[in-house]
Image: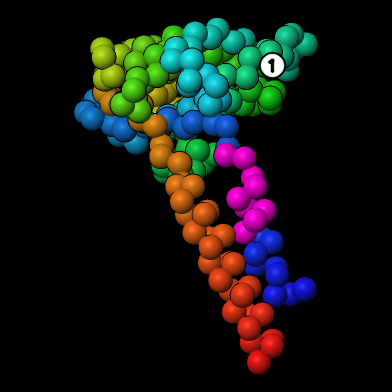
Amino acid sequence: MLRFTPLLFAAALLAQPAEAAVTYTWQQIDASSAMPANLNLRLVFSDNAVRQGKLTLDIMNDCNYGGSCDFEQDSLLSLHYWYGAKDAPQKGVNLIDFGYRSKPKMFHDHIALDLTFLPDGMLSGWISANNGESDFAMESVGSLFTVSVARSDQPDGCGMEFPECAGSTGLLVEVPEPSSAALAGLGVLAGWFARRRKGQARA
């Protein structure tokens, strides 16, 4: 039975459906002296939303105070905005952490956007987000976004440290998914390994 384990593992991997989500991240072009240099923005959309080519949303979650939990949409799956280490949003400052199935982390979540998914893997349009403690808004000309405002009640980041936070420019670029060819290669390798072990057992 043991000799079939790699093959079964690879088959299970290949049987998994591709993750139905597309991620876009902020790629800074020009930093503004009025803003912290390490701005991060990560948006995750459903695959279906991206295929539609355009998305307009206005979401308000205030269920921490007995209001509505706006879970009816499943187009914007998550939004993370922060200043700090690129892969550590929870350790950053001015964090807005929106998840479409989770309660607000701070006071409320208000996300509004009007975006077009461009064929070159970029976005255009405008985005604003507010969690009751930090907020930002940005708008693009073509695919080049400019931060029009960013504020926070926190002392760091776009709070007292940078009271006039605005002006940085950048692109929102699709993050490539791992190639399905890599999974197919795993299946071939597992099959070869299983046949080799079978041959050794007969010898």
200 up-or-down from 3: above or below: below
Mark 1: give few (<14), some (14-19) or many (20+) Cα within 10 Å: some
Nearest the eye: 73 or 62: 73
Q: In which quarter of the image is residue 139?
A: top left
Residue 63 percent across, percent down from the top left: 73, 14
Nearest the eye: 136 or 53: 53
Residue 161 percent across, percent down from the top left: 36, 27
The residue located at (34%, 36%) in the rendering is 38
104 up-or-down from 36: above or below: above
**What residue is disc 1 on?**
71
The residue located at (42%, 23%) in the rendering is 159
Q: Residue furthest bottom?
A: 203
Q: Give yes or no for residue 112 being in the magenta stretch.
A: no
The residue located at (60%, 50%) in the rendering is 14
110 up-or-down from 40: above or below: above
Image quadrant in which the N terminus is located: bottom right
One can see residue 117 in this view: yes
Q: In this view, does 52 lie to the left or right of 125?
A: right
Residue 66 percent across, percent down from the top left: 78, 11
One can see residue 161 in this view: no
Q: Give yes or no for residue 16 being in the magenta stretch.
A: yes
The residue located at (52%, 53%) in the rendering is 183
Residue 116 percent across, percent down from the top left: 39, 14
